[in-house]
Amino acid sequence: MRVFLCEKPSQGKDIARVLGAGQRGNGCYSGAGTVVTWCIGHLIEAAQPEAYGEQYKRWSIEQLPIIPECWRVEPKAATATQLNIVKQLVGQANELVIATDADREGEMIAREIIDLCGYRGPVQRLWLSALNDASIHKALGALKPASETLPLYYSALARSRADWLIGINLSRLFTLLGRQAGYDGVLSVGRVQTPTLALVVARDREIARFVSMPFWNVEIALSAGGQSFLSSWIAPDSCIDAEGRCLQQAVAQQAADRMRIAGSAQVVSVETERVREGPPLPFDLGTLQEVCSRQIALDVQETLDIAQSLYETHKATTYPRSDSGYLPESMSAEVPTVLAAVLATDPSLRPLLDQLDHTQRSRAWNDSKVSAHHGIIPTLEPANLSAMSDKELSVYKLIRAHYLAQFLPHHEFDRTTAHLLCGGQNLHAIGKQVIIPGWHQVLAVPAADDANDESTPRSQVLPALREGVSCQVGQVDLKALKTQPPKPYTQGHLIKAMKGVAKLVTDPRLKQKLKETTGIGTEATRASIINGLLDRNYLVKQGRTVRASEAACTLIDAVPEAITDPGTTAVWEQALDMIEAGDMTLDDFVEKQSMWITQLVQQYRGATLPIKVPAGPACPLCGGATWQRTGKTGPFWSCRSYPNCKGTLPIQNGRKASAKRSATRKSQ
């Protein structure tokens, strides 16, 4: 019996349909000697510390570090029934095809089941980038040998065990140290979550420290040949800051007065440059999350869920958890089919599609930039737009537009810069005139995310200017402005920061590694990392932004720099890549992680954390200091000498509890 092991039920249903295995069974489909079954994500998970010994149920610094000699897994309670079905079918198989998602995590989901079942028969790998019928047929005809993707499993297992070692040991260590310092909360530490949280804490503190400075600008309305345009005053070097802003009001005021009196400005020079802009790449997941956060106010998890739905449910787009926006050159043969499917999906696009050059190859077609997955694009078969929600349709249209843009001409415009002299003051005016709209027909906004980018010309067309031409001065507007603090992170901007974290690393080797691995976290995990920080109340939503909570600041101040430094993550990612390439073994990696954890625990075991805890009232029994703790009924003040002194006070109104009640109350 040939068993196909999928990642989720919808995926199993699609593959079973193509295989002709149409008989529905309990947790599977079957037909003609083939069975298609599925996991529901991970059916098993790493065992908790208490599985290695009852003593680990109680958190204690003396027990750290906890380093398993033989790693254990346990079934997830919620999916135990499906696990039993999968185990039974794998046990009956004489041939197995891994059909989980084509990535590191998908490989682990299948391989951990295979290991658990002790299956020793032949294994092949189905590598899918889309779940439409044509793509499934194509992948079935090109099954990979299982040995080709086995290193992905070892890499995923290494990542999982490193996360366990760091999360379990360092969360317990710093939580216990925090309690010694009077902090009653849990200080949760993670390999990726902690440096991510550090980004937000640093940004929030930068905002809090920011001192706004006044500066002045002068904008001058000019006209020539009956056409009006705007120009800006260029302040002299003696009164500007590093950003070119005038810091002296008197100088700006004097310049404005002189230009009003002068009444005219003479053109000193005019330079025109033809600019050709190629289209942005098709989306990788991170860029899609950034754009959807900015343009349609979607949370990053919501964008991932919608992209997954477009892939699984609607069969409208390809695999969403891609880390590359590039396309393999072999897919150029499918361009006519994809465009035909896009037209069948939305016939209103015919006027636009008639303008496309099917043979045009943008920079997106590049085999060297594609590893496991390519950019997210429409599939080979028509989709049903009416079945999509409004948000799904918006995301689909963005994905579609980025693909169609590859077959339109470059966007071309003339950027004109005119330098003028008015009353002894230097001015400049920047104009932009679109020559060829090109791909802007489908993407109306440039790919740049900074509307204040001075390299982007103003949306004005200058009149025909040449050296010596006199321009009439209209309104001269002296503007009193203030420097603005950095903006708080939105979820989309945080994803972008996680991807671009290399700029915060000084070591050249680590900086390059972070660029190669596109930052910290992966396309598949960044949304869940941010969600986890929100669930733990380390991050707090404020409108469209996320801010660090007081607990987050406490954590970042408490843990060593090695934990918050993205360079540490770069070292780990480099090691995971080496495992995937066969240059490092899983055991070697875990041993090195264990040694590092052991050293860190030894270094900080007796440390005093720099945590500021609000001072409580005096203990009602001994008169000593109290700190806030949390019991079954909520927070309360507890004597710092507990358990030697069991004095407590309720926190609600600050009144002293009776000595009798204080002496007998159990501490939590």
Image (cartoon, rainbow, N blue to C red):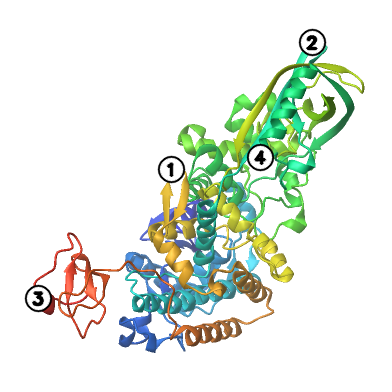
At label 2, the amino acid type is: Gly
CB within 8 Å, label 1 to label 4: no
155 above or below 223? below
For disc 2, the marked residue is 226
At label 4, the amino acid type is: His
For disc 4, the marked residue is 402
CB within 8 Å, label 4 to label 3: no
At label 1, the amino acid type is: Gly
Q: Earlier in the sequence, mark 3 or mark 1?
A: 1
For disc 1, the marked residue is 543
Label 2, residues with CA under 10 Å away: few <14, some 14-19, many ≥20: few
Q: Nearer the viewer, mark 3 or mark 1?
A: 3
Residue 258 seen in this snapshot: yes
Label 4, residues with CA under 10 Å away: few <14, some 14-19, many ≥20: many
Q: CA distance from mark 4 to mark 3?
A: 71 Å
Q: CA distance from mark 1 to mark 2?
A: 46 Å
For disc 3, the marked residue is 659
Q: Nearer the viewer, mark 4 or mark 2?
A: 2
Q: 45 left or right of 280?
A: left
Q: Earlier in the sequence, mark 4 or mark 3?
A: 4
Residue 316 seen in this snapshot: no
CB within 8 Å, label 3 to label 1: no
Label 3, residues with CA under 10 Å away: few <14, some 14-19, many ≥20: some
Q: 602 left or right of 569?
A: left
Q: Position of residue 114 (x, y in %)?
A: 49, 74
Farthest residue, direction right: 467
Q: Earlier in the sequence, mark 2 or mark 3?
A: 2
